[in-house]
């Protein structure tokens, strides 16, 4: 029996359809159907001048819009050969990591509701608010920030930002312990996530899975380390992995990453240099191609741009991490129960905005 | 004076007034018929049912309110707080809202079964109230095998769920219905076994006798602690609340077996859930917490207080636990709770044989 889980279904976190073939309650096969949220993003960019695309790239993912606009700016900087001032790089690292924490918190909130624990949802949203407030202090917006610019960032950090930020981080690290009490302390949560949704490292690599999903399969790869952008190579941090390859491992990786992000922000504040935060970028892009890739909270995000010498891109291609991970979903789902679908899909952290573009 | 005599008094008084009016008009035959013992008895029982239904209704409404407020506080928010004092009338507003909703029936539903399944569910839930005494004077019927009756009526509901899930002609409801049946066989046996200990100690299946036995010695939670634990876990499964609300697991099955029930049917089903929650908490109080016995306050108030405290535990569980998978419910029921219930039975037999009770 084929069950359509979606496009309107509590499990989907967006607008997509997971067709599941079940035998009783056991999943025999699965087939993701995406495209309900296709907005023609890549085509739209071809009619916009380069700076106009920055707010558009915010809309790629509602969960972590900062990483996408940053990725876009990084791509265009590579295309134009703009050297970003060092202070801007540090500010970018700080806001990116704050965004990563906010994104992971939203994932944890959604994961709680997926498993029937509404309390976790409210708790995580409560702490996410602090990070949104911080980002609002920097950028003026809560969700779509429009903050990075080609050649730097829009504005400098507000006064006392470091103090506020460190206070939030201190408070938040205590709250992570509280989450771990709620989740790891609950046997039922462990029963629902351990040995569920096994993704073997070989499968993960072959299917192009990236990000926390792959690090949960014990593959130690993180673009911030292996292809460092911004100033990640100047900071002292490590990659979080977990050997279990199941939903619990992916949960653990994200929890550890939140702690690591707090650490990275602290490191960045220690080294934050004075100086300009933006340089002027040329109006027209050269007639060549460029790409950049970053470690999105959900995996490896890549943008590839073809410039034709005008002020508009000739072609802009987005490689979305979730678009690729969705193809690994049948592998993760096969052999488990229907009740495991929210547990497995929740551990993937779906974001349809970037998937369908 | 018990509830029957009280209602009889009121009914007799009313009948006398009506008879006086009828005699004055000249309808002596009707007046004689109305004054007959059988009619008065029937009217008394009817009045008693209305009183009981009203009490069940008020308790259910209060429980929904209690759940909203307690769950809200557990989640660090405030719950319903606008309509009425502390949001108490929010439930009534919601009930009125469900009355106004459009009445949608799925096109290919089996109309007869679809219509009757909620009737069975709601009817059996209300029937539960008949066997639950509020005190030794406030009861509808004092059955010799009251406990057996309660659990027999409890077990009708999964049947209704199975029928309703099947008749709605929807895959989610079908799975929800099947799950309800599977859940029944997993919790029912440990549940009933955990009660056998109490029945042994009290030497009766009559609820009043069980409560009196506790007032003679001590609350049965003390000699029957293991049984109490087993009972609490299984009664949560019986009344289908988180972590055992599998037939309506909203993350994977939308709303489970009642996905296709809308409008006031949904409202009544929701109310029936809380009738069952009340019955479950009431049985826990009657069997393990000394029923209506307590100092100073009237017995009925003591009983209600204890019921709300037990129901608070249900809410607490809901606020802190994730949902269990269906095969894990079977595992818990058969591999963990059944042996525990057997151990409890052995303890009960030992305690009884040694003459401590």
Image (tube, coloured by chain):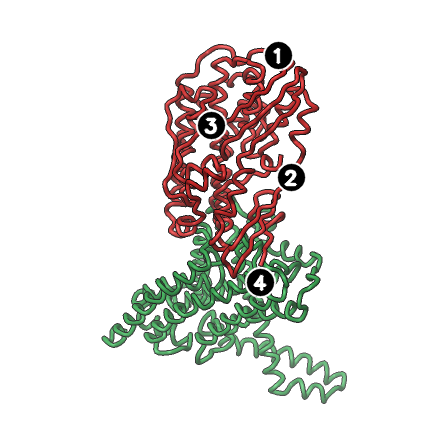
Q: Do callouts 3 and 1 mark residues in contact (Cβ within 8 Å)?
A: no
Quarter of the rendering containing residue B309 = bottom left
Q: Secondary structure at mark 3?
A: helix
Q: Earlier in the sequence, mark 2 or mark 3?
A: 2
Circles 3 and 1 on the same subunit: yes
Chain hosting mark 1: A
**Where's residue A161, x and y in %?**
47, 21
Chain A, colour shown: red
Chain hosting mark 4: B
Which quadrant: the C terminus of chain B? bottom left
From the image, state whether disc 3 or disc 1 is nearer to you: 1
The answer to whether A279 appears left or right of A218 in the picture is right
* Residue at image point 28% right, 70% down: B347
**C-alpha span from label 1 to label 4:** 62 Å
Q: Which chain is green?
A: B
Which residue carries the number 1 mark? A282
The answer to whether B270 appears left or right of B279 in the picture is right
Which residue carries the number 2 mark? A37
Chain hosting mark 2: A
From the image, state whether disc 2 or disc 3 is nearer to you: 2
Which residue carries the number 4 mark? B174
**C-alpha span from label 2 to label 4:** 30 Å
**C-alpha span from label 2 to label 3:** 27 Å
* Dot 3 alpha-carbon crowd within 10 angstroms: few under 14, some 14 to 19, many 20 or more: many
**C-alpha span from label 4 to label 3:** 45 Å
Q: Secondary structure at mark 2?
A: loop
């Amino acid at each position: 029996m084929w069950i359509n889980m979606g496009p309107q279904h509590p499990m989907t976190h967006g607008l997509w359809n997971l067709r599941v073939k079940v035998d009783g309650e056991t999943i025999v096969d699965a087939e993701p159907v995406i495209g309900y949220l296709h907005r023609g993003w890549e085509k739209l960019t071809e009619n916009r001048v380069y700076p106009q695309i920055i707010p558009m790239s915010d809309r790629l993912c509602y969960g972590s819009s900062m990483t996408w606009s940053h990725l876009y700016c990084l791509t265009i900087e590579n295309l134009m050969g703009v050297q970003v001032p060092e202070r801007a790089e540090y500010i970018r690292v700080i806001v990116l990591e704050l965004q990563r924490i906010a994104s992971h918190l939203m994932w944890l909130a959604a994961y709680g509701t997926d498993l029937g624990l509404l309390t976790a949802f409210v708790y995580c949203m409560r702490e996410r608010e602090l990070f949104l407030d911080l980002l609002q202090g920097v950028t003026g917006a809560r969700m779509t920030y429009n903050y990075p610019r080609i050649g730097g960032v829009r504005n400098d950090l507000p006064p006392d930002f470091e103090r506020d930020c460190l206070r939030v981080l201190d408070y938040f690290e205590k709250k992570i312990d509280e989450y771990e009490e709620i989740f790891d302390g609950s046997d039922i949560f462990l029963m629902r996530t351990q040995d569920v949704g096994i993704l073997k490292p070989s499968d993960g690599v072959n299917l192009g899975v990236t990000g926390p999903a792959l690090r949960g399969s014990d593959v130690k790869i993180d673009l911030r380390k292996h292809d460092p952008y911004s100033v990640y190579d100047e900071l002292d941090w490590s990659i979080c992995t977990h050997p279990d390859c199941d939903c619990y491992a992916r949960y653990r990786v994200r929890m550890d990453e939140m702690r690591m992000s707090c650490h990275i922000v602290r490191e960045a504040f220690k080294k934050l240099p004075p100086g300009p935060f933006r340089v002027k970028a040329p109006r027209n892009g050269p007639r060549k191609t460029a790409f950049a890739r970053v470690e999105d909270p959900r995996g490896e995000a890549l943008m590839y741009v073809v410039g034709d010498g005008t002020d508009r891109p000739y072609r802009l291609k987005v490689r979305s991490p979730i678009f690729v991970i969705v193809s690994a979903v049948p592998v993760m789902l096969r052999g488990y129960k229907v009740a495991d679908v929210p547990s497995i899909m929740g551990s993937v952290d779906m974001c349809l905005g970037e998937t369908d573009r | 004076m018990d509830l029957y005599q009280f209602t009889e008094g009121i009914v007799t008084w009313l009948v006398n007034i009506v008879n006086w009016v009828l005699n004055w008009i000249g309808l002596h035959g009707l007046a004689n018929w109305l004054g007959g013992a059988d009619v008065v008895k029937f009217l008394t029982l009817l009045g008693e049912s209305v009183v009981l239904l009203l009490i069940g209704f008020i308790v259910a409404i209060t429980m929904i309110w209690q759940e909203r407020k307690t769950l809200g506080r557990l989640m660090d928010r405030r719950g319903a707080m606008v309509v009425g004092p502390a949001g108490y009338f929010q439930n009534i507003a919601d009930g009125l809202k469900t009355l106004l909703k459009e009445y949608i029936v799925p096109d290919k539903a089996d109309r007869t079964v679809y219509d009757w399944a909620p009737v069975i569910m709601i009817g059996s839930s209300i029937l539960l109230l008949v066997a639950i005494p509020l005190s030794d004077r406030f009861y509808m019927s004092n059955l010799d095998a009251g406990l057996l009756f309660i659990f027999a009526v409890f077990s009708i509901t999964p049947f209704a769920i199975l029928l309703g899930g099947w008749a709605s002609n929807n895959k989610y409801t079908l799975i929800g219905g099947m799950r309800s049946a599977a859940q029944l066989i997993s919790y029912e046996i440990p549940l009933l076994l955990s009660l056998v200990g109490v029945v042994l100690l009290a030497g009766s299946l009559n609820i009043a006798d069980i409560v009196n036995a506790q007032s003679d010695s001590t609350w049965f939670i003390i000699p029957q602690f293991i049984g109490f634990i087993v009972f609490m876990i299984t009664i949560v499964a019986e009344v289908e609340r988180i972590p055992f609300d599998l037939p309506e697991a909203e993350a994977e099955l939308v709303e489970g077996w009642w996905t296709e029930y809308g409008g006031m049917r949904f409202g009544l089903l929701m109310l029936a859930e809380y009738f069952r929650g009340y019955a479950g908490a009431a049985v826990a109080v009657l069997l393990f917490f000394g029923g209506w016995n307590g100092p100073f306050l009237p017995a009925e108030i003591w009983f209600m207080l204890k019921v709300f405290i037990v129901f608070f535990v249900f809410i607490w569980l809901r606020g802190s636990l994730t949902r269990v998978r269906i095969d894990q419910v079977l595992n818990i029921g058969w591999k963990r709770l059944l042996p525990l219930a057997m151990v409890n039975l052995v303890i009960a037999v030992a305690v009884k044989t040694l003459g401590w009770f």
